[in-house]
Amino acid sequence: MRSNPIKLLSLLVVAFIFVSCSHRLSGKWNVNYETTSPGAQTVSLTNIGTMNFNSNGTGEKQLNYSVMGIQKQDNSPFTWKWEDGKYVEIKSDNSEFAKTWIVIENKRNLQRWKSTDGGSNVQIIELRK
């Protein structure tokens, strides 16, 4: 049985459009987290869990980490919005990660974002595929 070249070409074009419309942030990312306070030591945490960004602007966090002896878990859904390639807004109930982040590095397999806690503490999140 012979396949129709026009149908095959149409299928390839549709598949290409679907893949190319997917945002770079879409997918599952491993999370590293860092916080710095003026005059204090930087706290760096590696592999604290994952964040999954869906192409429809939703996602799920599965984070488990300890800061200064305080155990924290964040296993909740979130929504996200990419703002002009400069900012990422994450909305989620009762989450330290729910805020607007400044995009420092934007690569296919590496994202680095910076924010503050509303005070003098600077937070950096690094996402790796």
Image: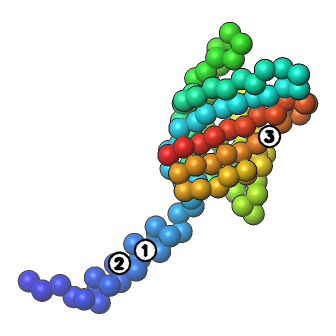
Question: How far is mark 3 from mark 1, CA to CA?
Answer: 35 Å
Q: How would you rate the neighbour count of disc 2 (Cα within 10 Å): few for under 14, some for 14-19, many for 20 or more?
A: few
> In the image, is 22 to the left or to the right of 84?
left
List the single residue furthest toward the right.
119
Q: Where, by quadrant of the figure, is residue 93 drawn?
A: top right
Percent of width and height locating residue 19: 46, 67
For label 1, the residue is 16
Q: Could you say where residue 115 lies in the image, as x and y percent from the top left?
A: 80, 40
Q: Secondary structure at mark 1?
A: helix
Question: Separation of disc 2 and disc 1 at Cα?
Answer: 6 Å
Q: Residue at x 89, y 34 (%)?
A: 118
Judge depth for marks 2 and 3 and give the one in front: 3
Amino acid type, label 2: Leu
Q: Amino acid at mark 1?
A: Phe
Q: Are marks 2 and 1 in contact (CB under 8 Å)?
A: yes
Q: Which mark is residue 26?
A: none
Note whether 94 is above or below 127 in the view shown.
Answer: above
Residue 115's disc is 3
**Residue 111 drawn at (x, y percent):** 62, 48
Give the residue number, with chain letter if any, for mark 2: 12
Q: Position of residue 41 (x, y in %)?
A: 78, 20
| Element on which disc 2 rests | helix
In the displayed structure, would residue 8 be above or below residue 39?
Answer: below
Give the total number of marks visible in the rendering.
3
Q: Which image quarter: residue 78?
A: top right
Image point (21%, 88%), residue name? 4
- Name the amino acid, label 3: Ser
Q: Counting residues from the N terminus, which is met first, the one under dot 3 or under dot 1?
A: 1
Please tell me which of labels 2 and 3 falls first in the chain.
Answer: 2
Residue 108 vs residue 118: left or right? left
For the residue carrying disc 3, how many other residues have a C-alpha within 10 Å: few (<14), some (14-19), or many (20+)? some
Label 3: element kind:
strand
